[in-house]
Amino acid sequence: MTDNNQITQLLLYLLVFMVFVLFILIGVLVFVKIKDNQKKKDEESNTEDEKGAIMTSNTATKGYNKQSIMTFMEFDKVEDNMIVQKNGNKYLMVVECQGVNYDLMSEMEQTAVEEGFIQFLNSLRYPIQIYVQTRKVNLEGSISNYNKRINEIEAQLRRREATYESNRTSGLYTKDELRSQFYELTKLRNLYEYGKDIIFNTQQMSLNKNVLNKQYYIITSFYPSDIGNENFDKDEMKSIAFSELYTRCQSIISALSASGVGGKILDSNALVELLYMAYNRDEAEVFGLDKALNARYDELYSTAPEVIDKKIAALDKEIREKAEEKAQQVVEEVVTEKERKLQERKNRMDDIIGEMARMIINENEPYIGKEVAKEANEKITNEREQRANKKTSNTKGTRRARTNEKEENINGQKTVKKAGRTIKTA
């Protein structure tokens, strides 16, 4: 009985523990369910808010009066270094100013700049606008120009090296002349290395996209209505506007020069770039104006004559390169032929001297006597024969040495073959 009571009590405890665990699991499931329902309600609420915002935006868009692109850009065209606005009722001309480093100046220089700027302001008789444009520094154009220049220097260096090596081995130049040529070659090589360093440093600098540059402009305007109600056609009015704006800009440049600030009038291409940067501030670095113009995006099609012109230009370039190679080759061949003749003349110098000495002896035979002349000629003949024999022996020795060398090479390259035997068994 005691054992049964203990088993019953143990089962009771186990049942209570299982019920407790079951209640805990039920509570967890209820909590998770509540959380899911709350999350779904929040998502539905957000979706309704977004739908309401979209509907409001569409309503506002439908009620918005869209303007034309020309009205949005606030100018009609760029012509004759001027920006034309309001259908020819307003003309603008822009002066680009080169600033001065005011902070690095001395006190007297700063005072002079301030006085010059005061004079500039006092001399104004018409309204102006000062415009500052911040641009990211784009070094692609500089890198491209550097690469073109360094390629030219490299080609010149290679030609100079070949010429110097040919002159050095020719034996036609003195040590001073070769030293001078080597000095010029070294200067050109240093220039080439310096150019490569500049390109590398510029490329590293171009990786920094946070380098900014500020450019300053002064804008002056002209209204045709200011000259009265006289009847002028568009061309005459454009000419009058250009003359008036050009005079004003020149006076601005002259007045700014007193404070050390330089300036220049922007031409039509520079004005287009200025407007392009103003209206395309984010895309200007990727889709630059120069890239668009070089890619000819402003042209609808290309005609055949342009392709032919490109082929002609490429053919002319190829002809010029081959002509330069041919000229250098012919010059080297001529120099080599002269060197060969010079060497032959050096080798025959003793024989030539002997023949000339024999002629001199024969001419002076009446004065020196026949016996003396005869012995002298015989001595010259003997010396010539000795030189010939010596030359022949040297030639034979050289040939024998070359033959021995070839035999040694052949003997060194011989391979030993082992003969195999076949054994027959009965």
Image (spheres, rainbow, N blue to C red):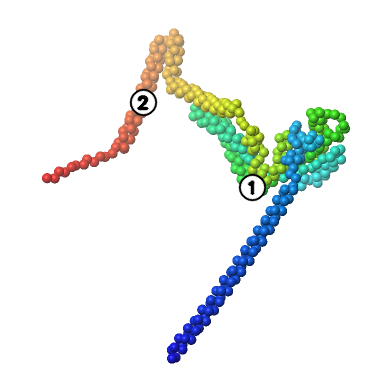
Q: Of circles 1 and 2, which is in front? A: 1
Task: Estimate the x, y position of residue 388 in percent, counting from the top left.
Answer: 37, 21
Which residue is at a point 50% across and 29% down the rendered structure image? 166
The residue type indicated by label 2 comes to: Thr
Please name the residue that numbered disc 2 is placed on: 395
Task: Estimate the x, y position of residue 226 in percent, counting from the top left.
Answer: 86, 35
The quadrant in which the C terminus is found is top left
Please name the residue that numbered disc 1 is placed on: 208
Task: Estimate the x, y position of residue 71 in percent, counting from the top left.
Answer: 75, 40
Instruction: Using residue 212 as the reference point, say whether residue 252 is left or right of it.
Output: right
Which residue is at a point 69% across and 44% down the rendered structure image? 281
The quadrant in which the N terminus is found is bottom left
Which residue is at a point 75% across and 32% down the rendered structure image? 80
Instruction: Using residue 29 as the reference point, say whether residue 393 is left or right of it.
Output: left
Which residue is at a point 62% across and 63% down the rendered structure image? 40
Q: Is residue 281 above or below residue 307?
A: below
